[in-house]
Image (cartoon, helix red, strand yellow):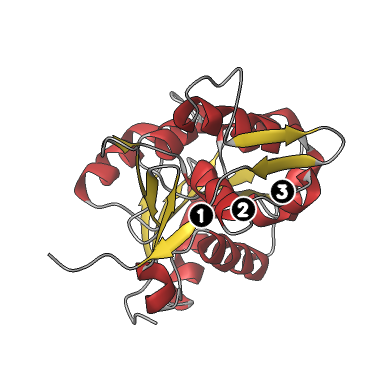
Amino acid sequence: MSDTPVKVLLVDDEASLREPLADYLSRQGFAVRQASDAAKARSALLEELPDIVLLDIMMPGEDGISLCRHLVESRNLPVIFLTAKGESMDRIVGLEIGADDYVVKPFEPRELVARIRSVLRRAGRNGTPANDAEAHYEFEGWQLDPLKRRLTDPEGTVVPISSAEFRLLVALLDHPQQVMDRDRLLDMVQGREAHLFDRAVDNQVSRLRRKVEVDSRDPKLIQTVWGGGYMLAAEVKRFVPEES
């Protein structure tokens, strides 16, 4: 495992929460950068990409939902929301667009550290065995490099995927031609909090289909098994590419 500290971008307009939390995370060995709003967070992203983002939902100017969409779709970054008790609908929207987890204020900092480490494990960014990480997936002409989180189509074109879409695809690729029910996929892709809104996995499947299917309205690769869940109807191979 690398000795490089995990880089955390903490985005919250409430300094009385943000600054003590940043100090605590620093004492736990994380490299923390702070931003008081979405604009400052976007500037920080241009200088250095973090390993994970801790993101408040309600902020002046651009809110956390909008910034989360950018982080997930454009930057492929894991996101944990820091939410207030009354923001349940926002949490649901966040899970739908690909956020990884959330904690409700006020929270125990030790719980947040555990959530960070859990999300990083699920995202494959912490402690992945080298030989497993180097092995690519191949299915129906598509290839997925799990180390670089890069998906290429049969013509060799890179197809961007979000963090949640990546984890969903890996879950299906690890269990080809097996029926995966929604609860199992939710555990593997989003973690236990996503059970608050079980349509999250259906939405992620729909998004993934639009990227890998010839016709997402008539899917051949990711098939729906009525009453059961989903199945990747393809042969999957693992291989380590030769060094060029």
Q: Amino acid at mark 2?
A: Pro
What x and y, as percent, mark residue 34?
Answer: 38, 52
Q: Which residue is mark 1?
A: 236
Most distant residue in the right direction: 227
Mark nearest the camera among 3 and 2 is 2
Task: Tell me which corner region of the image, top left, top right, bottom left or bottom right, holds residue 71.
Answer: top left
Front-lying residue, 179 or 16: 179
Question: Foreground residue, 209 or 35?
Answer: 209
Q: Are marks 3 and 1 in contact (CB under 8 Å)?
A: no
Taking the spot 44% from the left edge, 25% from the top edge, the residue there is: 62
Q: Residues within 10 Å of mark 1 (few under 14, many from 20)?
A: some
Residue 110 pos. (x, y %): 64, 71
In space, the residues marked 3 and 1 are separated at their CA atoms by 22 Å
Q: Are marks 1 and 2 in contact (CB under 8 Å)?
A: yes
Q: Earlier in the sequence, mark 3 or mark 2?
A: 2
Give the Cα separation between the discs numbered 3 and 2: 17 Å
Asked if 39 appears above or below 181 in the picture, the reply is above
Within 10 Å of the Cα at label 3, are there few (<14), some (14-19), or many (20+) other Cα atoms? many
Q: Amino acid at mark 3?
A: Leu
Q: Say which residue label 2 marks.
A: 176
Q: CA distance from mark 1 to mark 2?
A: 7 Å
Residue 14, image x and y in percent?
52, 44
For marks 1 and 2 on the same chain, the one whose residue lies earlier in the sequence: 2
Answer with left or right where residue 63 lies relative to residue 160.
right
Quadrant location, the C terminus: bottom left
Of the residues under marks 3 and 1, which one precedes in the sequence?
3
Q: Residue furthest left?
A: 244
Question: Is disc 2 placed on a helix, strand or loop?
Answer: loop
Q: Which mark is residue 186?
A: 3
Look at the image and tell me whether residue 122 can be seen: yes
Instruction: Describe the element under mark 3 as helix, strand or loop.
Output: helix
